[in-house]
Image (cartoon, rainbow, N blue to C red):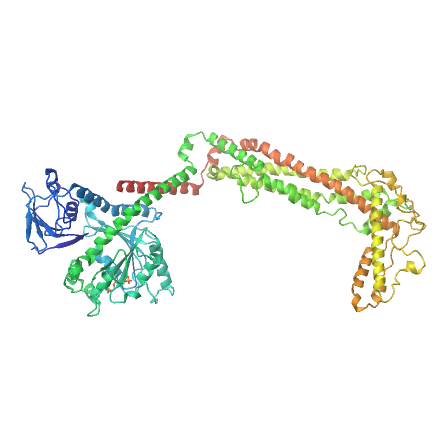
């Protein structure tokens, strides 16, 4: 037997290599079922032992074409002896596990097995594919696609680093008390037999960006490793020690969850065998994200530290906790081994011996230990990657399309350099003008459905905002009775007037008309603001590349609008002035004197009836009879209302005396209505009753009488003369009628003015103004200076696209 044995677990196949110089590649290629005489044998004599399994009933084909390939019996051992340097075919000795010879000679296997084996070989290439992808994504510092990898999870000191080191067969991870692993470590293990001979030197390489807080990416290339991507995470800890933050448990838990949550992650849940499995933090966490145990591999460390008489056979054979990918037991170097720098290969040998000699584990020794763990991880990862590859490819393809679109949207500066810059500018100006116009007209393509915009907002301003503002003005606002009386008196001059003077009406109505100006000016401003907004929103994606050109365009359009603002507001101002320049009492819609008077009579009649009704109710309820009406006390007429049924001498004239019809009454007729003796027979309309009421005593149940009387007071609370009262009412009614006419006209004309002088003018002139202002050879280079951010965005986008393309290429090669 050989003394120097390297052991290498390969699925269900065990290869024992006599000569350690023979590279793994050689064995893998043998297992890939290549013809042995095509292989490049190292010098020297060697013997290979194959332990393999095939179906028992498999009959071996005998054709010449299948010579020089291999077959394995179910229980037997295939032994190959090759004398290097001779031309003879290699010899195969085939015996059972006890090395009893069972056959000899050329052995062949079925062709379909060769294909399957070759396929498996190809699968084995998938891990380098993922590693390559990872390198590609590392180069841009992002992991846009969730690459399959193995995440190592375990509580503190559970032996995570030891497991990793055993897999890598290198003493490379930091050791110490407390949490030593503080950042995720992405470990890429690369079997250097995958590379050319000149690259076959072993080395480790840090791939993460320096000076940046990121996971550490470490690539280890060695002939002693299998292709694997592992992520080592800080250990789960309960109590912070030293300089650790108080929420250390939460922080590490979240970090671990971030990694294991990804559906493409395989979870390597490390638990020490000397602690009850139900307390395993790693398995608890894994269960959270993988409740069915589909992507969790259990690793039991410290099997050697279990109490004497106990073992973990039940766990390792999957009878305690069912994990689809199973549990694998390992024995790592103890602290003492580390302190005494026990070499790795020795440690592996001790591990192998431990399992082989342990009464509980010897039967499952081939499924225990670090080499088996490494191989299993490799297989699982490979299968996992194979499953995920189509999905990843689809994702990469859609990323390529998206990124390509994005890149296109940034434009191509090289193309534009060649093209006439004048044409580029002209195109942008034309597009901007068209957008501006269509925003106003509402024909823009991507019109918002979330808020009113463009022309619709202008319409809203006219109809809702401006309309409401005008409506809210009361025709007689700010006009007090005192103002009206003074105006009437002033307009009569020194003589007592015979009728309500027209001058007084005109005097009073003009300032009211002026009230329409502020909201009209505000309307102009609002539309102007709206246009400015439209102008700002018109930037196309292309235009956003050129901030200077964009700014200039906005400046020019704003200037144009500002220029138009002045004449528009001037015109609106004129409209109001025009309206107040001449008070047209012949306007067909104007109420006219007669109608106004009829209206007042009607109203007063109503009031009188109301008063009488109230008075009656008050009297009915009053404990002390009402003695408040001096008119009554004087023995005069009971009605002390401003009674237009009576003329000044007290005789009843009745409403029939007023024959004026609404609207048809001439100005003269209404103005000549009022023959009056000035102040001669003026009477106080209604003496103040409130004092009487207030001095009275009410029954407690009739408290509402006070309310009623208050109303009465309000009806007649002025001390105007009857005639003045009448005149005031008349003037008010005329002002209201006239104001409403003017308001309607203004409400109609202001939007027309704004549209004509501001909106349409800007639409008609925007393009001309832009071309005049910006289509100048000497400005071109300045205007077409690209936005720096955009240039860098484009560069980023380009890099991403390259990365995705490269990734896609790598995947295409693998599939
Ligand atoms: N005897 C024995 N000791 C082990 C085994 N595995 C790990 N140890 C020891 O346990 C201690 C902790 O192991 P590490 O591999 O550093 O554990 P870790 O989980 O990486 O620790 P942190 O990174 O700090 O969370 C070390 O002293 C190891 O020597 C094992 O299987 N058997």
For the C terminus, the image quarter is top left
**Image quadrant, ligand 1:** bottom left
Q: Residue at x 41, y 35 (%)?
A: 413
Residue 85 is left or right of residue 396, and the answer is left
Residue 693 is left or right of residue 365, and the answer is right
691 or 246, which is in the foreground?
A: 691
Can residue 534 be seen in this snapshot? Answer: yes
Task: Find residue 276 and report its horizontal and vertical position in percent.
Answer: 27, 67
The quadrant holding residue 557 is top right
322 lies above or below 465:
below
Task: Find residue 88 and report its horizontal and vertical position in percent.
Answer: 5, 41
Task: Find residue 752 and report its horizontal and vertical position in percent.
Answer: 66, 36
Q: Residue at x 72, y 40 (%)?
A: 744
The quadrant holding residue 611 is bottom right
For the N terminus, the image quarter is bottom left
Residue 761 is left or right of residue 580, and the answer is left
21 or 555, which is in the foreground?
A: 21
Report the residue that reaches farthest toward the front: 57
Number of numbered discs overlaid on the protein picture: 0
Can residue 188 be seen in this snapshot? Answer: no
Task: Find residue 70 and report its horizontal and vertical position in percent.
Answer: 12, 45
551 or 151, which is in the foreground?
A: 151
380 lies above or below 800:
below
Report the residue that reaches farthest toward the bottom: 308
418 or 809, which is in the foreground?
A: 809
């Amino acid at each position: 037997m050989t003394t120097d044995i390297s052991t290498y677990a390969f699925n269900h196949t065990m290869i024992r290599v006599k000569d350690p110089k023979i590279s793994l590649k050689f064995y893998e290629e043998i297992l890939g079922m290549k013809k042995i005489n095509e292989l490049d044998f190292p010098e020297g004599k060697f013997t290979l032992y194959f332990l393999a399994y095939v179906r028992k009933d498999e009959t071996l084909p005998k054709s010449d074409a299948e010579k020089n390939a291999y077959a394995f019996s179910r229980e037997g051992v295939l032994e190959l002896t090759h004398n290097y340097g001779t031309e003879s075919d290699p010899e195969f000795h085939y015996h059972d596990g006890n090395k009893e010879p069972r056959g000899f000679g050329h052995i062949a296997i079925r062709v379909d097995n060769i294909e399957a084996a070759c396929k498996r070989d190809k699968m084995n290439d998938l891990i380098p594919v993922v590693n390559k992808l990872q390198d590609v994504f590392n180069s841009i510092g992002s992991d846009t696609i969730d690459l399959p990898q193995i995440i190592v999870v375990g509580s503190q000191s559970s032996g995570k680093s030891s497991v990793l080191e055993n897999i890598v067969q290198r003493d490379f991870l930091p050791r110490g008390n407390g949490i030593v692993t503080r950042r995720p470590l992405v470990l890429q293990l690369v079997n250097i037999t995958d590379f050319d001979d000149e690259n076959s030197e072993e080395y480790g390489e840090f791939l993460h960006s320096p000076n940046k807080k990121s996971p550490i990416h470490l690539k280890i290339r060695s002939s002693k490793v299998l292709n694997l991507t592992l992520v080592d995470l800080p250990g789960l800890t309960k109590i912070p020690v030293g300089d650790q933050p108080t929420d250390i448990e939460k922080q590490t838990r979240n970090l671990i969850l971030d990694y294991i949550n990804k559906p493409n992650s395989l979870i390597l849940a490390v638990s020490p065998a000397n602690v009850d499995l139900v307390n395993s933090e790693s398995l608890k966490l894994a269960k959270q994200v993988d409740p069915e145990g589909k992507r969790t591999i259990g690793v039991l460390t410290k099997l050697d530290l279990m109490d004497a008489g106990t073992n973990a056979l039940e766990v390792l054979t999957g009878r305690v906790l069912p994990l689809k990918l199973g549990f694998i037991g390992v024995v790592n170097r103890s602290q003492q081994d580390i302190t005494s720098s026990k070499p790795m290969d020795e440690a592996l040998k001790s591990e192998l011996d431990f399992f082989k000699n342990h009464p509980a584990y010897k039967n499952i020794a081939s499924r225990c230990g670090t080499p088996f763990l490494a191989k299993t991880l490799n297989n699982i990862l490979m299968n996992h990657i194979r499953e995920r590859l189509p999905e990843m490819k689809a994702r990469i393809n859609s990323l390529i399309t998206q990124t390509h679109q994005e890149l296109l949207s940034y434009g191509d500066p090289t193309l534009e350099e060649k093209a006439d810059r004048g044409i580029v500018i002209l195109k942008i100006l034309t597009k901007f003008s068209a957008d501006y116009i269509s925003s106003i007209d509402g024909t823009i393509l991507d019109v918002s459905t979330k808020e009113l915009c463009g022309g619709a907002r202008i319409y809203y301003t006219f109809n809702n905002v401006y309309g409401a503002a005008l409506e809210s003005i009361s025709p007689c606002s700010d006009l007090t009775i005192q103002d009206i009386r003074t105006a009437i008196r002033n307009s009569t001059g020194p003589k007592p007037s015979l009728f309500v003077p027209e001058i007084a009406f005109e005097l009073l109505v003009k300032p009211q008309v002026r009230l329409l100006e502020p909201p009209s000016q505000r309307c102009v401003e609002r539309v102007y603001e709206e246009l400015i907004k439209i102008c700002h929103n018109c930037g196309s994606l292309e235009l956003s590349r050129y901030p200077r050109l964009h700014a200039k365009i906005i400046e020019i359009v704003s200037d144009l609008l500002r220029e138009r603002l002045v004449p528009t507001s001037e015109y609106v101002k004129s409209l109001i002035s025009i309206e107040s320049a001449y008070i047209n009492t012949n306007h067909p819609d104007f109420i006219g004197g007669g109608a106004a008077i009829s209206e007042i009579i009607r109203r007063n009649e109503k009031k009188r009836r109301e008063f009488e009704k109230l008075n009656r109710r008050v009297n009915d309820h009053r404990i002390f009879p009402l003695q408040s009406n001096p008119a009554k006390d004087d023995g005069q007429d009971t009605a002390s209302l401003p009674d237009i049924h009576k003329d000044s001498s007290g005789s009843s004239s009745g409403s029939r005396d007023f024959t004026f019809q609404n609207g048809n009454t001439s100005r003269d007729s209404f103005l000549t209505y009022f023959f009056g003796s000035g102040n001669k027979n003026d009477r106080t309309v209604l003496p103040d009753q409130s004092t009487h009421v207030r001095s009275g005593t009410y029954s407690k149940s009739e408290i509402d009488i006070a309310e009623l009387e208050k109303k009465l007071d309000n009806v007649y609370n002025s001390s105007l003369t009857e005639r003045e009262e009448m005149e005031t009412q008349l003037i008010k009614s005329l002002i209201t009628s006239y104001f409403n006419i003017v308001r309607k006209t203004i409400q109609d004309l202001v939007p027309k003015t704004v549209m004509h002088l501001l909106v349409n003018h800007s639409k008609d002139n925007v393009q001309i103004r832009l071309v005049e202002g910006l289509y100048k050879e000497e400005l071109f280079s300045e205007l077409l200076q690209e936005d720096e951010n955009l240039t860098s965005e484009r560069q980023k986008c380009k890099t991403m696209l390259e990365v995705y393309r490269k990734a896609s290429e790598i995947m295409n090669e693998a599939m």
